Amino acid sequence: MTQAAKNIEQRFQDASAKLARAKSEIGKVIFGQDSVVDKTLISMISGGHVLLIGVPGLAKTLLVETTATVLGLNSSRIQCTPDLMPADVLGSEVLEEDGKGKRSFRFIQGPVFTQFLMADEINRASPRTQSALLQAMQEKAVSVNSKDHALPKPFHVLATQNPLEQEGTYPLPEAQLDRFLMQIDVDYPDENSERKILLATTGNDQADIKSVLKDKELIEIQTLVRDMPIGEDVVDAILKLVRNARPGDDAPAVVNDYVTWAPGPRGSQALMLAVRAKALLEGRESPSIDDVVDLAEPVLKHRMALNYKARAANIGLKDVISALTKDL
C-alpha cells in the first residue's frame, strides 16, 4: 500500500471515529430514534438539507439543537408563521446617518446568516417567504436589493413539518422540496425508549452534551465523502432506480400507473452522496447496493407524487419505491 493510500485510509478511519462519537453524544438525549439520527448525520456530512416530518412532541427541535451543538456549528431558529416576511429571514438594509450628517445604507443580517438554520413548521410560512429560503438552500447566498450576500460555510437548513394540521399552511413547492437531500419521517418511540424519555426529562439531572466536531472538520468530512470511491454496480443501481421511477415507455407498470411527478438528476446526485455518507458513518470505505435500497425512500419520496388512481388503490410512495428497489 502506498503512502497516499495509507493517508486516505487514515482519514476515513479518523472521520468514522469522530462520527461515531457524534452519534453517541446525540444518543444521550435522543432516545429510540436511531434511524432518524443516522439519516440526519448522513444528510449533514453529505452537505445537504433535511426535512423532518412528525407530529408534535417527538423531539424534532431537540434533535436539531443537539446536532448543531455536537457538530460545533453556530445556529439560529425561525418560527414560521403566515405573517413571516422574507426580510425577517434574510435581513434588510437600514438608512443610517453618521456624525457628519452623511447618510448611507447598512445591511443587517437576518437569522439565515448562520451555519445551522432551523425552520420550524416551514409549511406555515407564505410562498413568498419560502421562496426566499429557496435561493439560500441552493446557492448558499441571498440577494437583498440586488446585492448578493454569501452565507457562512457550512450552511444547512433543517426544517420541520407537522403532517396533521393543514389549516393555515402552504404546501412546499416541488422546486423547494427538491432542495432537501432527505425527507425523514419521525415516528413514535417504542416502549423502552419512551420509558427512558420519561426518566431523563422529568428529573433535575440533564445530560451534558459536548461538541465533537468543529465546522472546519465537518467541511473536511464532507470533502472526504465526495472523494470516496464508488463501484460501477452501485452507480448502475442508482441510475436504474431513479430512471425507472420516471413514467415512460421503459418504466415499470407500477410507475406508469401511479406516478405523476418523478425525481430528476438532483435525486440521483443526492442518492450518490447519501450512500457514500452512510458507508462512512458505518466505518466502511465504499458504499454497496444495500445502501441504495436503504436510502431510496428518504431520498426519493419527496421528489415524487402519485395520482388519484394510486389513492383509490391505497398505493403509497413507500409501496412504489419498494417495488422499484426489488429489481436492483
Image (spheres, rainbow, N blue to C red):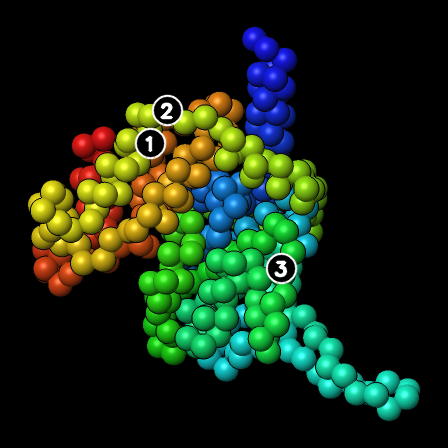
- Dividing the picture into quarters, in which one does residue 146 lie? bottom right
Residue drawn where x is 30% and y is 51% of the image: 264
- Residue 138 image offset from top left, x and y in percent: 48, 58
* Viewer-side residue, 156 vs 78: 156
Residue drawn where x is 44% and y is 39% of the image: 273
Q: Amino acid at mark 1?
A: Val
Residue drawn where x is 35% and y is 77% of the image: 167
Given contact means CB atoms under 8 Å apart, are the residues at marks 2 and 3 in contact? Answer: no
* Viewer-side residue, 166 vs 1: 1
At mark 3, the secondary structure is loop
Given contact means CB atoms under 8 Å apart, are the residues at marks 3 and 1 in contact? Answer: no
Q: Amino acid at mark 2?
A: Gly
At mark 2, the secondary structure is loop
Residue 191, above or below 261: above
What residue is shown with label 2?
A: 231
C-alpha span from label 2 to label 1: 6 Å
* Left or right position of 47 against 176: right
C-alpha span from label 2 to label 3: 34 Å
- Dividing the picture into quarters, in which one does residue 250 lie? top left
* Viewer-side residue, 56 vs 315: 315
What residue is shown with label 3?
A: 151
Residue 226, above or below 194: above
* Left or right position of 109 against 286: right
At mark 1, the secondary structure is helix
Mark 3: few/some/many CA within 10 Å (<14, 14-19, 20+) = some
What residue is shown with label 1?
A: 235
Task: Decide which of tag 2 and tag 3 comes sooner along the chain.
Answer: 3
* Left or right position of 92 against 253: right
* Left or right position of 250 against 3: left
